[in-house]
Amino acid sequence: MQIGKYRSSDGSAGTAVTFLLIGLGVGAALGMLLAPKSGRQMRKDLRRSYEDALGTISEWTDEAKDRFDEAVEKGADFADELRAKAEPLTDLLRKP
């Protein structure tokens, strides 16, 4: 560890988003626990928040899967294009 010099970590934006979501969750839970509500109302609110969070995470997961599938498809198309463009050149190089 160097003292006096700032070095960024090798973490990605995903790590920052993860910590942000954890912080938001902890803050929301503390806010709900410290709010002056009855136990029944508190449990109902916590259950609703939990279900909302699960729904949001599910949507994000589906979107990430869709984007990944699109990226894989674009990569395959790009590889096919490169293969088609390189084929005449490889034919020329293989001729004696």
Image (cartoon, grey):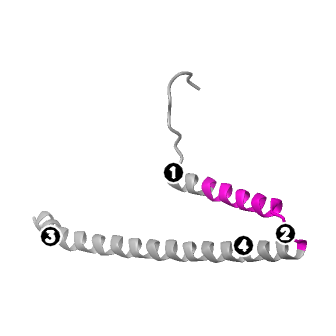
**Marks 4 and 3 in Cβ contact (< 8 Å):** no
How many numbered markers are drawn? 4
In this view, the mark in front (3 or 1): 1
**Marks 1 and 4 in Cβ contact (< 8 Å):** no
Amino acid type, residue under disc 4 in the picture? Ser
Look at the numbered disc 3 and give the secondary structure of its residue: helix
Look at the numbered disc 4 and give the secondary structure of its residue: helix
In this view, the mark in front (3 or 2): 2
Amino acid type, residue under disc 1 in the picture? Ser
Which of disc 3 and disc 4 is earlier in sequence?
Answer: 4
Residue 72 x, y percent position in the rendering: 40, 72
In whole angstroms, how far apart are the C-alphas of marks 1 and 4? 28 Å
In whole angstroms, how far apart are the C-alphas of marks 3 and 1? 43 Å
Q: Does residue 23 appear left or right of residue 65 in this picture? A: right
* Magenta-tinted stretch: 19-39
In whole angstroms, how far apart are the C-alphas of marks 2 and 4? 15 Å
Amino acid type, residue under disc 3 in the picture? Asp
Numbered circle sitting on residue 12 = 1
Reading the image, the residue beneath label 4 is: 49
Q: Does residue 45 appear left or right of residue 11 in this picture? A: right
Look at the numbered disc 1 and give the secondary structure of its residue: loop
- Quadrant where the image shows the N terminus: top right
Reading the image, the residue beneath label 3 is: 91
